[in-house]
Each structure stands twice: as C-alpha cells, then as structure tokens.
Image: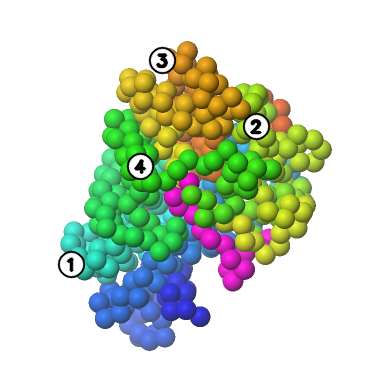
C-alpha cells in the first residue's frame, strides 16, 4: 500500500473519531494517531499532512462513509442526486427499491428523523473537521507558510472547508438571509455549537477561498482530484452568486473562462454515439475537478454510477430509474444534441443512457466501476458568467457566453445559436440562461443551486412517481433539508431545525 493511501486511511479514521470521548481519556492509546499528532509531526513528516488531505479526497467519493450501510450515502455525488431530485429536473420515474422515495416525495426535507438529513449534515461537517485539523497543523487560520508545500496544503484545506460550508449553507437554509442563524461554526479555534448568522458562515467561506486562491497560485496539481486555484475560484463564484453579489460572481466566472485554459466539451463528447462520452472519463479536457475510479478502489454496487447508469450493475438498471423531467425535456430545442443524451423508447425512455454510460454499453454490465466521477467542468462558468452578466445589465456578454455553448450544441452551429439568442433581452434572456443551465447540467448536482439563485418555481412533469404535476417555490420548507435528529439530540445548543 502506498504511503499516501496509508495516510488517507488515517485521515478517515480521524474523521470518524471526531470529538469522541476517547480523546478525553488520560490514558493515551499510542496505536491511534490523533489530531494532536498531525499537528506535532507534520513538520517532521509532511506526508502526514498530504495523506490527511488525501483522506478528505477519499471521503468525498466514499460509499457509505457516514452511515456504513445506506446505499444512497455516497459522498458528494450522493448529495448531488438528492439535490437533482429535489430540483425536480431529475425524475424518480420508477421506484422499486425505495432509496430515493423520501426525497422525491418531499418527506425527508420536512422530517428531521430521516437519514437523508443526517447523511448530508455529517458528511460536510466531517470535511470541516478534518480540514480544520490540517489548518491547525500548519499554523492555524492566520498562518503564512514559508514553504511551497505547506502553502499548497493550507490552500487546499481552506478550499475544502469552504466547499463544505458552502453546501451546508445552500442545503440547510431556505433562502439567503445574512441575518438568519443557520449553522454551528467551527474554524478550529472558535467552537460555537449554536447556530450563527449566515453572514458569519459566508464570511468564513469567502475568506477561506480568497486565501486559498492566493496560496495555490503557483500550485501545479498532479491530478484532477486535488483542489487548485481555479476550483477555489469556481466555488467563490458560486458563493457570491448565491449571495446575490452578481458583479463579483461575474468577475470570477469570466476569469475562469478566459484564463483557466479549459476548453468547452466538444460536440462529439456530448452524447453517444459521438467520438466518446465527455462524462465518464476524468481525462476529458473540459473537466476541472473529478475523480479517476480504478479497479483498485473497488467501487461496485454502491456508487453514483450504480444509481444513475443503466449500463452499470446496480439500481438504475434494476428498477430505480432516474430520468429527465418531461417538462425539461420538452424545453430542449429540436436539433440540440443534448436532447439525444436521453433514451426515447422502452425501459430506458428519458434515462440518460447517452450522457452517462459505461463504454461497453451492456445493460447492467459494469460491475467493478471504472467510469469516473465529475464534480466541476468549464461549462458551469460560461453559464454562470452569462447569468451574472444578464443580472448586472451586461447583456452583450451574457449573449456571447450563451452563444459559445449553443454553437456547439445546436445542429445549425453559430447561425442557429444567433437565431436563438439574438432576439432575447431582459427577463427572457435570464430565463433562457436558467433553462440552458438546467439542460446542460442535468445529473451533475448543480441545478438545485441555480434554482435557489434564480428564486424559481419548478413544476414537475408527468414522469415522476411522486407529486407529478405539482409546483414548488424554491424557498418553501420542502425544498431544503432539516438539521437532523442526531444533531438536535446531541447538541443542546440547537433546539430547532430552521
């Protein structure tokens, strides 16, 4: 086993241990590495810090990392499914095993005893906890490391902490209100188990990401599963957009588009049977953040691919089908290649069989999963730039960003994109950008964020098993998750979910 993997296991053990009573026992168990050990020995053995960061990366894609048992406990990609279903763009169109019925029927989001709430809450707070461990080991929140290695480790840890708090704020607050008390606050120095105002959480997110961008400025990462400055910029752009600070979101999104060097996904990569899917291989040039799944990792039945891909031996193939909402599908123009990402007949009707698929394309065929996991790609920032530009009155930039995408996606190329975009202005332009965000990012966990940013109402199509045809405003109780029962029971500083 490689040293980095050993330290990753140690880091996950630290995540699981958290602040358990074992740490209060004066009899020291020398067989267990503690948070204090990481801080004490990181200078002697920098690999310990690197391994702890790798532990966060491993946890992000770890099946059953919170519960040990639940088949929808899948790290970030598991949260992505919850949010895609909650946005209603992903329809649970067949419900055989029941893993997502409480999300689809909007029961989990109003019942704090449901496991979905605990999974999301504990997943992100474990990321916060281990990121705090790394930050403290490198000198604390105000540290200014002198070595490149320490700078880069601190930058990654701060980006991870901000990432976790960003999603906590999105998922557990109905709508952005800086004065509302929403979450406990832990930065490694300040421990406040009571809910603090959203402004305090967002201040930490912005500070962490701003510092991360500086700390990672000269960092050349070895693989796309590592945080770098452009991922940090992307998270910061999303943060400002969620706050309604569209001017700052636009600056960051434009910087990513203009300077990151990531090209747009090619037409051949957008849907089978083109040159190959752009959604199953981390080497796809448009991917900014993703994970290379190898046979050594042993992902099989329990994985995001198992819940989404008809060609993987798991739930989507066996009867828990996730499909594009019929209303959203109807909004994809004729001649748009993204329409062909979804099946049109039989069992696979409206399933994403031509967007997310094992290359062998044998129904239920992939057992050990080697198709990769996508977390961020460049198209997100073309769309976020377009959205922020439209909201700040820069319609020329908004149109140009949207045209850049649609020129590749429309059969008629630039002429068809011009014909679609040029007549738009005002709210119609904003609506078109939002619609294309929903189409483009289907199944990638980002449309819930767009729903909230645009303060939208979603109306479900006909192919949802639960609550078909009903409409939901972004800010109603059913559209955000609850602080879980476990937290209420174990944290006397919190007595209410919202």
* Labelled pair 2, 3 in contact (Cβ < 8 Å): no
Mark earlier in primary sequence (2, 4): 4
Q: Residue under circle 4?
A: 256
Label 1 sits on a secondary structure element that is: loop
Tell me the distance, in whole angstroms, between the alpha carbons under discs 2 and 1. Answer: 51 Å
User: Is 75 included in the stretch rendered in magenta?
Assistant: no
Observer-side mark, 2 or 1, equals 2
Label 3 sits on a secondary structure element that is: helix
Q: Residue under circle 1?
A: 146
Relative to 48, say whether 53 is above or below. above
Mark earlier in primary sequence (2, 1): 1
Across the whole image, how many numbered discs are drawn on residues?
Answer: 4
Which quadrant would the C terminus be assigned to in this image?
Answer: top left
User: Is 297 included in the stretch rendered in magenta?
Assistant: yes
Q: Identify the residue at image location x=27%, y=58%.
A: 218
Tell me the distance, in whole angstroms, between the alpha carbons under discs 4 and 3. Answer: 25 Å
Q: Nearer the viewer, residue 398 or 90?
A: 398
């Amino acid at each position: 086993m490689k040293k980095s993997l050993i330290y990753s296991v140690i880091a996950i053990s630290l995540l699981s241990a958290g602040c358990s009573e074992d740490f209060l026992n004066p009899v020291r168990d020398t067989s267990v590495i503690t948070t204090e050990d990481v801080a004490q020995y990181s200078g002697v053995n920098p690999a310990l810090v690197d391994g702890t960061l790798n532990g966060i990366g491993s946890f992000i894609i770890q099946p059953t990392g919170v519960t040990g048992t639940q088949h929808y406990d899948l790290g970030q990609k598991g949260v992505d499914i919850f949010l895609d279903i909650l946005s209603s763009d992903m329809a649970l169109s067949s419900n055989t095993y029941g893993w997502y019925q409480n999300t689809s029927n909007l029961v989990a989001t109003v019942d704090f005893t449901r496991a979905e709430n605990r999974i999301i809450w504990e997943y992100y707070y474990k990321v916060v906890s281990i990121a705090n461990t790394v930050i403290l080991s490198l000198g604390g929140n105000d540290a200014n490391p002198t070595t490149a290695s320490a700078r880069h480790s601190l930058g990654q840890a701060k980006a991870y902490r901000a990432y976790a708090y960003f999603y906590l704020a999105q998922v557990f607050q109905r709508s952005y209100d800086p004065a509302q008390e929403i979450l406990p606050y832990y930065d490694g120095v300040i421990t406040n188990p009571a809910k603090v105002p959203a402004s305090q959480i967002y201040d930490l997110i912005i500070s962490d990401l701003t510092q991360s961008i500086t700390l990672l400025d000269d960092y050349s990462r070895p693989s796309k599963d590592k945080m770098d400055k452009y991922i940090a910029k992307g998270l910061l752009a999303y943060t400002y957009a969620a706050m309604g600070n569209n001017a700052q979101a636009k600056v960051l999104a434009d910087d990513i588009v203009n300077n990151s060097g990531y090209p747009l996904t090619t037409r051949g990569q957008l849907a089978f049977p083109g040159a190959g899917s752009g959604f199953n291989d981390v080497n796809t040039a448009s991917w900014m953040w993703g994970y290379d799944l190898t046979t050594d990792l042993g992902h099989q039945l329990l994985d995001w691919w198992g819940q989404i891909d008809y060609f993987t031996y798991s739930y989507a193939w066996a009867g828990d089908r996730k499909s594009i909402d019929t209303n959203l599908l109807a909004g994809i123009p004729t001649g748009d290649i993204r329409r062909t990402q979804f099946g049109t007949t039989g069992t696979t009707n409206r399933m994403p069989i031509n967007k997310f698929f094992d290359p062998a394309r044998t129904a239920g065929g992939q057992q050990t999963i080697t198709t990769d996991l996508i977390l961020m790609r460049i198209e997100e920032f073309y769309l976020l730039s377009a959205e922020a530009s439209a909201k700040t009155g820069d319609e020329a930039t908004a149109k140009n960003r949207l045209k850049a995408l649609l020129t590749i996606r429309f059969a008629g190329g630039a002429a068809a994109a011009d014909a679609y975009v040029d007549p738009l202005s005002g709210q119609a332009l904003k609506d078109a950008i939002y619609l294309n965000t929903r189409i483009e990012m289907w199944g990638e966990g980002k449309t819930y964020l767009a729903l909230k940013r645009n303060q939208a109402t979603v109306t479900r199509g006909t192919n949802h098993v639960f609550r078909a045809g009903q409409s939901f405003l972004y800010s109603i109780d059913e559209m955000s998750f609850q602080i879980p029962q476990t937290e209420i029971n174990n944290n006397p500083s919190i007595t209410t979910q919202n």
